[in-house]
Image (spheres, rainbow, N blue to C red):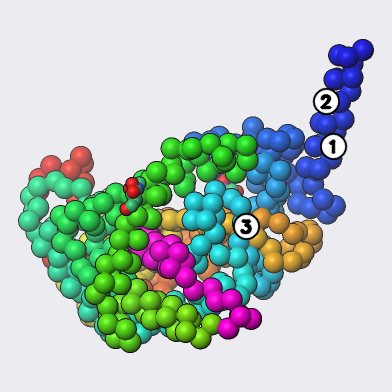
Amino acid sequence: MFASLVLLWVFIWIAILHFKSRRPKNFPPGPLNVPLLGSIFHLSLENPLKDFEKLRKSYGDVYSIFLGREPAVVINGVKAMKEAMVTKAADFAGRPQGLFVNELVDGKGVIMADYGSKWREQRRFGLTTLRNFGLGKNSMEERIHDEIKHIISTLEKNIGKTMSPRVMFHNAASNIICQVLFARRYTYDDELIKLFVGIFNEVSKIINGPWATLYDSFPIIRNLPLPFQKAFKKMENLSRRMVSEHRETRVPGEPRDFLDCYLDELEKVIYSVSCYTKSSFSEEELIIYLLNLHFAGTDTTSNTLLTGFLYLMNYPHIQGNTTPPCLVYVIFVMQAVIHEVQRMTNIVPLSIFHRTTKDTELMAYSIGTIVIPNLSSVLFEEGHGEFVRPGAFIKLPFICGQEDGVLRLAVWVGSCIHKLYVCNPHTHNNF
Ligand SMILES: *[C@@H]1O[C@H](CO)[C@@H](O)[C@H](O)[C@H]1NC(C)=O
Ligand SMILES: *[C@@H]1O[C@H](CO)[C@@H](O)[C@H](O)[C@H]1NC(C)=O
């Protein structure tokens, strides 16, 4: 009797769970959802990318999976991506909350902030301040030029030897953003910057590793003291240290950098705060904001440059040892190479997850949930003529954009490879 009651109870419980985690009406199709576990059996924890490819083949460009109990829609291909991210940008502009990456930063900062007034306020401040410190202006170019000199001299010290450029590129990229954030440049063997860069690498691995998937799939484990929390606390501590150093040396109203500007803003807010408006500015926000900008400005650029150098090594003819016909030609080729490098590098293949801001439609499906934009699927889609020609890197087509950021990067890479020739020590033995 007791056994059958238990059985009945288990049965009802599973039925309820199953019902709860079913796909809503007119929702994009996808693999079977296992109650409590989501689609985890369909995905490998180490590298789920291959499994996703199978799912796209079976279910089409817009399909759904379950992250634990929460459904998520994966968007593939230029057509669907354009509809979501361009045509209906505001509908798709949210960020999921309560995921691993949110918990890590405790809902603070801008990268993971949801679409709304806080995000708007912090973003506006960020854009204005970064512009004041040279974003899109000559002063930024000078900073980059200075850093290039250090890169070149490091490379020159290693002529004829083998070296790993990884740490050098991370330091260089970090230095450029550090000058904006903290008005400071660090030599490549500085202990503090080594610490920062080391922790960024560690945290980046954690975010892309199995912990994130487990954490999002099994809410039960969230209260355990998990190993990655220490790494994150260390990173937060470094940022906190920057803030307290700045507090001691700043002159109010005379900001030296982004951090000072934020502290000025914080003071204004404290003086003018009324009981009715709650400002989104706070020191805790600042600490994560700094990490957001520092991390995003370091990891993306350095990984792009690293991949660029890998391609230069593997396609040495791009390193151009013949005299170019004219400067315009050089800039043209340089832009094409950089666009190709950015395409092939594909630094954040699944973007940062989005969330719909209201119930909406995509490719005739009804969607109101987490959205995973598959950026690789766009970068490697053939036949649209917008980005891609298969094998483009080798043939160097002229796919030029006009943004000046690209030009600056072009100058950067250009001045490195103008002077030096990089090659792969494993395939090249006469250097
Ligand atoms: C994204 O697209 C690429 C290229 O088409 C594919 O290999 C990958 O499996 C896709 N990932 C997802 C999550 O659909
Ligand atoms: C962070 O800093 C606090 C106080 O300065 C210290 O007690 C703590 O051990 C530090 N945590 C880590 C992980 O470095």
Prevailing secondary structure class for the magenta stretch in the rendered image: helix
Q: Which mark is residue 10?
A: 2
- Tell me which amino acid carries mark 2: Val
Distance CA(mark 3)–CA(mark 1): 25 Å
Q: Earlier in the sequence, mark 3 or mark 1?
A: 1
- Answer whether labels 2 and 1 touch (C-beta < 8 Å): no
Question: Residue visible at 49% across and 74% down?
Answer: 281
**13 vs 353, nearest the viewer:** 13
Left/right of residue 348 with respect to residue 299 in the rendered view: right
Q: Secondary structure at mark 2?
A: helix
- Tell me which amino acid carries mark 1: Ile
Q: Secondary structure at mark 1?
A: helix
Left/right of residue 154 with respect to residue 34 in the rendered view: left
Distance CA(mark 2)–CA(mark 1): 10 Å
Q: Which residue is mark 1?
A: 16
Question: Residue visible at 47% across and 70% down?
Answer: 282
Residue 336, given in percent of the width and then of the height, sits at 36, 69
**10 Å neighbourhood of mark 3: few (<14), some, or many (≥20)?**
many
Question: Residue visible at 85% across and 20% down?
Answer: 6
Which quadrant of the figure has residue 51? top right
Which quadrant of the figure has residue 81? bottom right
Residue 132 visible in the snapshot: yes
Does residue 310 show up magenta in the picture? no
Q: Which residue is mark 3?
A: 96
**Magenta span of residues:** 274-302
Beta carbon of the mark 2 residue lies under 8 A of ligand 1: no
Beta carbon of the mark 1 residue lies under 8 A of ligand 1: no
Distance CA(mark 2)–CA(mark 3): 31 Å
**10 Å neighbourhood of mark 2: few (<14), some, or many (≥20)?**
few
Residue 49, given in percent of the width and then of the height, sits at 54, 43
